[in-house]
Image (cartoon, rainbow, N blue to C red):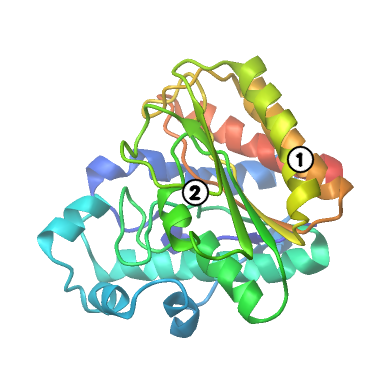
Amino acid sequence: MFPIAYHPIYKHPLPEDHRFPMIKYELLPQQLLYEGIVSNGAFFEPDLPDLQHILSIHKKEYVEDLLNLTLDARAVRKIGFPLSAELVERELRLAQGTILGAERALQTGIAFNIAGGTHHAYSDHGEAFCLLNDQAIAAQYLLDKKLSKKILIVDLDVHQGNGTAEIFQKNKKVFTFSMHGKSNYPFKKEKSDLDIELHDNTEDAKFLELLQNTLPYLIETQKPDFIFYLSGVDILASDKLGKLGCTLNGCKKRDEIVLSLCHKYEIPVQVSMGGGYSTEIKTIIEAHTNTYRTAANLYY
């Protein structure tokens, strides 16, 4: 059974007007248990991380401002959430969940974080509801601990992984690949090692063709020994913040392509769930659950 990082604080503490998209962090574990995809034993609650792991990616001054709640008003506005000690704790535990998931994926082949995918967090500031970059922190952790030599980050959220691109722009041990909506946030893109920009209303066939033509090539040429996959479901046509035109079935086939390649090449993979902002919560939960269904079919 694959391990899944989940902590009750993932769904807390947010102001009322931000809570709708966060309901999924409570409902998704319930759906996985209801379908029997996993049992309660699959879930683990991450503790607070060693700050040195955070500081391996994020600037000391920024981390201290988060911990002391001393970010200036402009920096807080860029994040989009009111800053609080509980929110900072949430992000710290979220990052630790991805670190531990990466470690466990080395044994199990695959591991998940119910939250995560905070790819808009830069080395020195947060943006767009992202304070700390969980997959970047975990990637650097694997490198520092000599648990990996070459990492591929596959970011298929509708938004470019701008923070991840900035963090690893000079690190040849991490290859960043982002396939995202061209006209979606962020409007000023960073430069990933490979960016594929998609036009508005791109549908399943084009999306999947591009992915199928790209990812096997990257695996063959980059030869990663670990993959981080950001499986945002905001590529759906129903997403309120996305501008692509994919269906639930297309989103599931995307997951099948990525996870099948990880399984085929026996490359451990850590999956963070990323965004999803469709009008109906049932659509968000169905799309995210498909990622776990795909993993269960492949790995168990």
- Name the spot of residue 289 as percent of width and height, x first: 64, 38
Towards the viewer: 8 or 156: 156
* Mark 1 residue type: Tyr
Residue depicted at 56% across the width and 60% down the height: 6
Q: Which of the image's four quarters has the N terminus?
A: bottom right
Q: Which residue is mark 2?
A: 26
**Is residue 234 found left or right of 146 in the rendered image?**
left
- Name the spot of residue 160 as percent of width and height, x first: 45, 41
**Is residue 135 found left or right of 221 in the rendered image?**
left
Residue 217's tag is: 1
Provide the secondary structure element on which disc 1 rests. helix
- Name the spot of residue 129 as percent of width and height, x first: 33, 51
Q: Is residue 125 above or below residue 196?
A: below
Residue depicted at 70% across the width and 71% down the height: 103
**Is residue 297 found left or right of 288 in the rendered image?**
right
**Is residue 19 found left or right of 197 in the rendered image?**
left
Q: Is residue 211 above or below residue 22?
A: above
Q: Quadrant of residue 67?
A: bottom left
* Mark 2 residue type: Glu
Residue at the outermost left position: 73
Q: Quadrant of residue 225?
A: bottom right
